[in-house]
Image (cartoon, grey):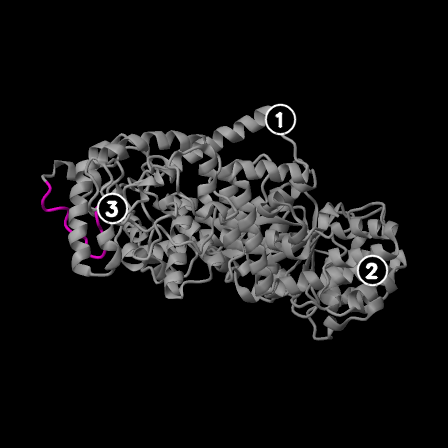
Amino acid sequence: MRTDPESPGIVARNRPHRIIAVGGGKGGIGKSLVSANLGVALAHRGQRVLLVDADLGGANLHTCLGVAQPTATLSDFMLRPKARLEDVIVPTGVANLSLIAGALDVLDAANIKYAQKQRLLRSLQTQSVDYLIIDLGAGSSFNTLDFFIIADHGVLVLLPEPTSVENAYRFIKAAFYRRLQQVESQYGIERLVERALSTREGAARTPHQIIQHVRQQNAALAERLEKELAAFRVKLVLNQARSDGDLNVGAAVVSAWKKFFGLEMDDLGAIRYDDEAWRAVRKRRPIVLEKPDSPAAIGIQRIADRLLALDGVTE
Amino acid sequence: MSAMKHFEQQSYYELLEVPVTASEDQILDAYARAMETYSPDSIAVYTLAEPEQLEALRERLTQAMEVLCALEQRIEYDRKIGVTRSAEELARLRTESLKRAAESTAGSAPAEPVAEVEPEVQAAPAAAEEELPEAEVVSGEVVVTEEVEPEAAGPVAEAQPGAQELASEPPAAVIPPEPVPVAASATAEAPASNVEAPSEPAAEPAPPAPAEPTPAAVPRVPLAAKPGSRSLTPAPVSGLKPAIHARPLAPMTRHGAPMPPPLPPRNGARAPAARPNGQQLGEAPVLAEASAIANAESALALASAKARDSRTRLKTVVDIPSDAEFNGELLRQVREGRNLSLQMLADRTRISSRHVENIEADRYDILPASVYLRGMLMSIARELDLDPLRVSKSYMGLVASGEKKNR
């Protein structure tokens, strides 16, 4: 989402080549599975990958990877002001792939304080790896959204089911408005945006309408804002496609999002529903390693390739 | 602003998500896809759009498809939005359009022969024959397959297919409310007429004309042809449904009667000779009669089978008379000819099986609103390898005339 280098945002020197955040709103849709396997796939392609379990309330990325009880977790970092993120990185047994496991304790990590979150965000953004993959928890809370919107690739996992689609739209809209809030303070247009959002239908506003509104006051600002918001370009992964028709749901969502919300989205591809997938989870092994030739694993490999292509990375 | 345009501000090309260079086929494909994506039960729009918004979008999409698939209108539209085309590109579009027009109207004695609309059903065979070929040619030149404005609907007058007239003919098709020219029971049809004399499948698969000496009968079952086969020649008989390409009786019995003669036949339905004849007009649904007619018709059909073979067919493999009226019954037969179960068709098109069933049963009064219905018909046609535009126009015409009648 932060793709415009000119934008008055965070520009860290020493930072991951790319940050991928995997979200989707709903629980149980395979966010952790996608994160873990995407991590493995990218690592296999020679990328240095750091996986971060930011599901602050229900971490289990380590289990997807077969890392038993991690010796250090995110809560070690959060609870000790002096700790460095590097201290809690654990190996995964896969070359090029390391992990920051999620907080396991019931310390209400889901409700971390603002300052803690900022510290974590800053630390994440300074990791010098090729890919930092953040596995988000369910829901659309700010603590989740803020990780999503710092990413270069906000990946939205979706199942071809109304419940998932509903949560997905809620999630990206929430992320969009969260992003808008950030941007507006950078541009000093809070009041403009606030007015745009609060008039009558309120938050039902689309980016187009918001910009129209801002344009009435200040055309130049509107121009910049538009550029900024157009960069909010979510990447879609359709999981558990059970029929050929399901394979088209991603494209349909991209089309619908554009027509009704006015923003672009990228369809990264679909992952077939595959019995091997849950078998692999039970074995606590990433399916990309366990059954590389299964339809699900192949789907994930393709997604990894597409991401690399988008980033212009050649192996 | 282009980045954030809403569909209201999108051009027809943007709406359909096709490049301005898109061919008619691409446009139709895109349209079918869009109608699926924006069908009321599409998962992709769940909670994203209100039903009214969806409906508005579908209307825009249909409008876009209709304009872009009528070359003259498309050129006009291009001018409006500032799309310029090179001479070569224009030539390419024209060629495509010609080809398509030829395919979909081939043999169907395009509209104009309307002259025959005249009640005297017994169109002189000879005349019909003569006219047909010419009509075909004409249709070839005509670009317009459909038109938005209803205007020309009425006047049948000069049968002679001038390009302009052709242009005017389609409107009727597009605009649903027009009563359909009803399938003609070709009964009286001169055997000689090339017009595909329908044999009547109707409800009871009337055994092909008992009367008929039949060698000819055999070759005519192309419908049963394998779905994949693309040959233009009639496929070998599979014996399944003898009378398939026949124009089903149903529509006629149902809506046929009240037809005002002057209406130009709607595109799928235009069979010059095939107009309902006087006698039948009045007495609609008498089953017995229907089957009698069916028999007679199939006999005629058999006789004309040979002639038909040489004609250009729908690009769809299937040997459906090019003037056939696509009612539910015919769709069902094509589906069965393809060895598709209703459920399979429903799954593939992602249309609920209830709708498919109602469409096939011609239960017009309980079908979804026309905006949805059109998309469904096109999906079904596509799945059955039929010409989507033709099928939807033909069927929508039936629906419209059904509505009228009920009123």
Q: Which residue corresponds to mark 1? A: B86
| Residue B285, image x, y percentages | 24, 61
Q: Which residue corresponds to mark 2? A: A182
- Residue furthest top in the image: B88
- Mark 1 to mark 2: distance in Å? 47 Å
Of residues A95 and B197, the one drawn nearer to the viewer in this rendering: B197
Q: Name which residue lies at 47% across and 62% down.
A: B369
Chain of the residue where label 3 is placed in the rendered structure: B
| Residue A144, image x, y percentages | 72, 64
Residue A40, compared with residue B312, is above or below; it is: below
Residue A282, compared with residue B317, is above or below; it is: below
Chain of the residue where label 2 is placed in the rendered structure: A
> Are dots 3 and 1 on a single chain?
yes
Q: Amino acid at mark 2?
A: Gln
Q: Which mark is residue B246?
A: 3
- Mark 2 to mark 3: distance in Å? 67 Å
Circle 1/circle 2 CB separation < 8 Å:
no
Magenta segment range? B198-212
Residue B166, compared with residue A300, is above or below; it is: above
Q: Amino acid at mark 3?
A: Ala
> Are dots 1 and 2 on a single chain?
no
Residue A127 is at least partly visible in this image: no
